[in-house]
Image: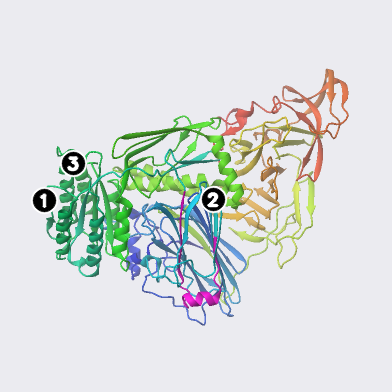
């Protein structure tokens, strides 16, 4: 295999350059792009002017392109699947390319070529020594900005050699939080496969907590690239494009677009169909906002309405250098004329133009909005004539002094107002101060935190890094306008977003003892039609409520909003909405992933604003670690992709088939001969030598025997624990009545074998008439193996994540085998997962899915220890502590009533009265027990066992709380092998 570094071009297409030298110049650590790039094999930027060199004779045919998006409360998960076929006998190059929103993060990319799987892995980007004179003058970089413009798209591209008469499939997933602008959320899907596709489908599912009040599917927006922001509909009419189907109720909507080849050809014969755009909004009321809770995390959406408009003080700073001549200046003037008409009577404004020299329309003041002032301002704009160079520093210094002096005057009219500078340029500094760090420092000193700067860049030759820092360090945002875009419309749209301030100095706070790791919760302004989003982690799982307080200032007074939010009630609402919508695996952790997404964005902004190297390093580490945790491809990470190795004859190099290790001794075996898929095989190193095994990866389409080797030692169901002691031939069982959200240590041998197993609990209501208050199940199980190198497996009911030298994400509905240096994994679709560590330690995880679950049932996992050989004598955990212990059965004198053999709590049978208590002796403890039976292996086998009551008191070392850990990857190891928490 050839491992390469995958570079997203994740740069807007209009920023790309023609020469490789320009691309290499961008690869500088100071600007946080991917280092050590091999341009011969890595995916990279593609100049807009270049077209594919593949001829019609050799270009692979795209059989299917599917884009599936699930939007859960504004957070969008998108999965792209593209299938190609090389119809020729000779190998040829296939190119997969797809435009993704600039604000999105890729979370997985996998190729399947010739039946072999080539996954990707996100790793920390290696540091690169800063070049001498390292000021790069801020050329646009791929994925380097935490701020992206509305509608801005970036190109992901991967080329691979496809053997003759073979298929290739590309799987890409990415995530983004939709931002509310101008009163609605906007989702864009780029459909530009560059050829007509036999089977093309786009599906967008929207699930919201509040009622969907507005939904519109626009005509396809045409344009060679999304960056052109073309305004011309690609399909006739004003409604959705042909073949679009919309199904909707109050809080749920599904939109499908499935054009056949004839319908595609009617739009564009070259496959460049355009952008499929959906607008929507939800119902909201004045108050604290919408708070959603899920699995120990929360997200808070705040977008109050019906507030009075706050007056604004605005200075427009316009670049009038020679490069602005022609279309740019004409469109800028058109936008300014429109903006002038929309200024409100209580606003104050002024204009500053800059080139070689500075001109101020009304020196020394801001003027009120009156008919005469608006008329005179239009004359001033009309007379602007572009000439000379670009003095950015002097332009921002003059405008800042103008606004600062106005605010410090004794005039009371500006109190309870919002002040801002709107700064527009199409180039880099060429006159006066030209060093970006100096300009940034001068700007911050001039602003003095008294107002915000919003920057706008037009075209390709803009120092976007400079504009971004100018805005981020001064509570504003930066907007890009592509070279061939409708600048007038985009300028007007950007002004509309910030032209109606409703609140200022917004602070959102939560109970200190209940929430931590809060994302940005201080906001300078809230503009009409937007939304403030805050997310965090809940620290106190036993707390029933979260105190929320929002303070802000509007045009009249300071306001305070407070509310006690019922966490249990909000979590139940969230679960109910998701269950009703049947959105699948994306719903499992959307709040946590949203929190991770926002936290990474905050970290990237923080490192840009940081003033010291230590502060920058802290932000960098925080954002990098979160990127790796959630497998996000960000400016701080790189994506490694294995490439197929093609032989000289054009065929794909084959790997030897692999078989699972032999089954452990003294264990029970289950077998089910139902039909199943043949698993694919993935190799990170040389494939292991074949050996006999229970689960085999067969080839040639042979049927896979779903045979799994298990022992009785397990934690399954509610959860019911079973421990088998082979030497004494006793089986012991106990229940653990845990709390939803708790994470339990099951096996802990971190110091010796390096193995740790943890399980996360979810809750469900107890059945009617049950003696329990609630049920709990394992929703997630993690297996960490630290020797010889660190790797882990995270298993949910919907997916399996294997992270070692490479990261692989597999749906639980697939059948596949994986071999790494110290891990072996065999997944049988929707049935079970067998994990082998260091050749001998073997765990099996069962998947329990319900087609029509009762209220007290939840999809969950069962954990079985199939072979403990390799675990040390110091192994601990709820199950692990018994691996090397022996136990004896004794009796204590006294009357004791024992339930019948097959009785349960709900169905008692005839009881028997005995003259002594049965008890177990373990270490120096004696534990009274009673005879019971347990069903294991998905109910396929019943075992008799001695049951220890009261949460296994005296049977286990310590108490329940000793086995509750802080997170799923906690490997803490304390005295007696118990958790130190």
Q: Which of 875 and 14 is in front in this view?
A: 14
Q: Which residue is denoted by mark 3 in the rendering? A: 407
Local secondary structure at mark 1: loop
10 Å neighbourhood of mark 3: few (<14), some, or many (≥20)? many
Q: Which mark is residue 284?
A: none
- The image position of residue 224, as x and y in percent, is 40, 71
Residue range highlighted in magenta: 255-282
Q: How far apart are marks 2 and 1 (CA)?
A: 53 Å
State whether residue 951 appears in this view.
Answer: yes
Reading the image, the residue beneath label 2 is 251
x and y percent of residue 780 in the render?
61, 44
Q: Quadrant of residue 552?
A: top left
Residue where numbered disc 1 is placed: 363
Q: Is residue 279 within the magenta segment?
A: yes
CA distance separating discs 2 and 3? 46 Å
Horizontal side, residue 911 vs residue 810: left or right? right
Query: Would you say residue 138 is visible in this rendering?
Result: no
* Residue drawn where x is 33% and y is 53% of the image: 497
Q: Are marks 3 and 1 in contact (CB under 8 Å)?
A: no
Image quarter where the C terminus lies is top right
């Amino acid at each position: 295999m050839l491992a390469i570094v995958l570079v997203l071009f994740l740069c807007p297409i209009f920023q790309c350059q023609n020469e490789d030298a320009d691309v290499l110049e961008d690869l500088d650590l100071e600007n946080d792009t991917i280092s050590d790039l091999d341009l011969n094999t890595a995916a990279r930027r593609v100049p807009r002017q270049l077209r594919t060199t593949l001829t019609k004779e050799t270009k692979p045919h795209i059989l299917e392109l599917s884009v599936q998006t699930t939007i859960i409360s504004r957070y969008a998960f998108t999965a792209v699947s593209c299938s190609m076929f090389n119809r020729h006998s000779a190998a040829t190059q296939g190119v997969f390319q797809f435009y993704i929103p600039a604000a999105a993060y890729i979370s997985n990319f996998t190729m399947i070529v010739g039946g072999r799987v080539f996954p990707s892995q996100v790793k920390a980007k290696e540091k690169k020594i800063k070049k001498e004179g390292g000021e790069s003058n801020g050329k646009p970089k791929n994925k380097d900005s935490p701020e992206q413009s509305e509608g801005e798209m970036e190109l992901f591209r991967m080329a691979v050699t496809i053997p003759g008469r073979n298929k290739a499939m590309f799987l890409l997933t990415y995530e983004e939080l939709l931002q509310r602008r101008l009163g609605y959320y906007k989702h864009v899907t780029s459909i530009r496969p560059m050829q007509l596709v036999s089977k093309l489908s786009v599906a967008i599912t929207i699930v919201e907590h509040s009622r969907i009040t507005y939904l519109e599917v626009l005509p396809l927006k045409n344009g060679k690239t999304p960056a052109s922001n073309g305004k011309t509909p690609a399909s006739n009419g004003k409604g959705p494009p042909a073949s679009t189907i919309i199904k909707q109720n109050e809080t749920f909507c599904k939109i499908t677009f499935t054009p056949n080849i004839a319908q595609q050809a009617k739009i564009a014969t070259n496959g460049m169909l355009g952008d499929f755009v959906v607008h929507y909004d939800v119902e909201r009321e004045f108050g604290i906002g919408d708070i959603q809770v899920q699995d120990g995390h929360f997200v808070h959406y705040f977008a109050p309405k019906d507030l009075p408009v706050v007056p604004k003080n605005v200075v427009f700073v316009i670049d009038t250098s020679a490069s602005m001549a022609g279309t740019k200046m004409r469109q800028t003037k058109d936008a300014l004329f429109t903006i002038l008409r929309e200024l409100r009577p209580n606003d104050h404004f002024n204009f500053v133009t800059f080139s070689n020299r500075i001109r101020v329309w009304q020196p020394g003041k801001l003027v009120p909005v009156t008919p005469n002032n608006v008329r005179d301002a239009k004359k001033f704009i009309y007379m602007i004539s572009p000439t000379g160079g670009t003095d950015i520093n002097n332009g921002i210094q003059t405008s800042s002094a103008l606004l600062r002096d106005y605010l410090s005057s004794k005039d009371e009219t500006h109190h309870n107002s919002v002040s801002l500078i709107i700064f527009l340029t199409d180039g880099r500094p060429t006159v006066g101060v030209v060093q970006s760090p100096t300009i940034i420092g001068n700007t911050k000193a001039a602003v003095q935190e008294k107002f915000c700067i919003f920057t706008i860049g037009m075209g390709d030759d803009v120092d976007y890094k400079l504009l971004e820092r100018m805005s981020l360090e001064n509570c504003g945002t930066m907007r890009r306008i592509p070279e061939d875009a409708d600048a007038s419309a985009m300028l007007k749209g950007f002004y509309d977003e910030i032209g109606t301030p409703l609140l200022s100095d917004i602070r959102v706070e939560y109970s200190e003892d209940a929430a931590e790791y809060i994302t940005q919760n201080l906001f300078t302004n809230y503009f009409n039609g937007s939304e403030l989003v805050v997310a965090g982690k809940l620290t106190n799982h036993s707390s029933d409520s979260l105190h929320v307080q929002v303070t802000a200032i509007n045009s009249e007074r300071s306001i305070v909003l407070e509310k006690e939010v019922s966490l249990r009630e909000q979590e139940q609402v969230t679960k109910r909405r998701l269950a009703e919508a049947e959105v699948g695996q994306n719903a499992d952790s959307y709040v946590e992933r949203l929190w991770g997404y926002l936290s990474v964005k905050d970290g990237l902004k923080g490192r840009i604003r940081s003033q010291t190297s230590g502060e920058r390093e802290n932000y960098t580490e925080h954002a990098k670690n979160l990127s790796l945790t959630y497998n996000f491809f960000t400016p701080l990470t790189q994506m490694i992709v294995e490439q197929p190795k093609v032989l000289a004859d054009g065929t794909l190099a084959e790997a030897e088939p692999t078989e699972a290790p032999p089954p452990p001794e003294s264990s029970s075996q289950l077998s089910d001969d139902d039909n199943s898929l043949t698993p694919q095989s993935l190799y990170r190193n040389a494939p292991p030598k074949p050996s006999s095994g229970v689960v085999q990866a067969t080839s040639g389409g042979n049927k896979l025997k779903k045979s799994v080797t298990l022992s009785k030692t397990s934690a399954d169901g509610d959860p019911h624990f079973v421990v088998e002691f082979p030497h004494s031939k006793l089986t012991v069982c106990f229940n653990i009545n845990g709390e939803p959200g708790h994470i339990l240590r099951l096996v802990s041998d971190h110091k010796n074998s390096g193995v740790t197993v943890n399980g996360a609990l979810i809750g469900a209501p107890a059945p009617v008439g049950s003696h329990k208050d609630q049920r709990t199940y394992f929703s997630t199980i993690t297996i960490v193996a630290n020797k010889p190198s660190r790797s882990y497996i995270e298993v949910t009911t919907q997916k399996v994540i294997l992270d070692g030298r490479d990261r692989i994400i597999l749906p639980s509905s697939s059948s596949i085998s994986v071999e790494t240096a110290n891990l072996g994994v065999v997944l049988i679709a929707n049935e079970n997962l067998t994990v082998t560590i260091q050749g001998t330690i073997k765990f099996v995880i069962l998947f329990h899915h319900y087609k029509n679950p009762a209220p007290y049932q939840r999809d969950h996992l069962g954990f079985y220890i199939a072979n403990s050989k390799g675990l040390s004598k110091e192994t601990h955990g709820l199950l692990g502590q018994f691996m090397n212990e022996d136990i004896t059965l004794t009796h204590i004198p006294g009357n004791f009533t024992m339930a019948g053999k097959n009785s349960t709590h709900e169905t008692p049978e005839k009881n028997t009265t005995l003259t002594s208590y049965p008890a177990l002796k373990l270490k120096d403890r004696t534990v009274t027990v009673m005879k019971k039976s347990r069903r294991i292996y998905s109910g396929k086998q019943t075992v008799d066992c001695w049951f220890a009551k009261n949460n296994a008191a005296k049977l286990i070392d310590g108490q329940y709380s000793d086995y509750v850990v802080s997170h799923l990857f906690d490997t803490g190891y304390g005295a007696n092998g118990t958790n130190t928490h």
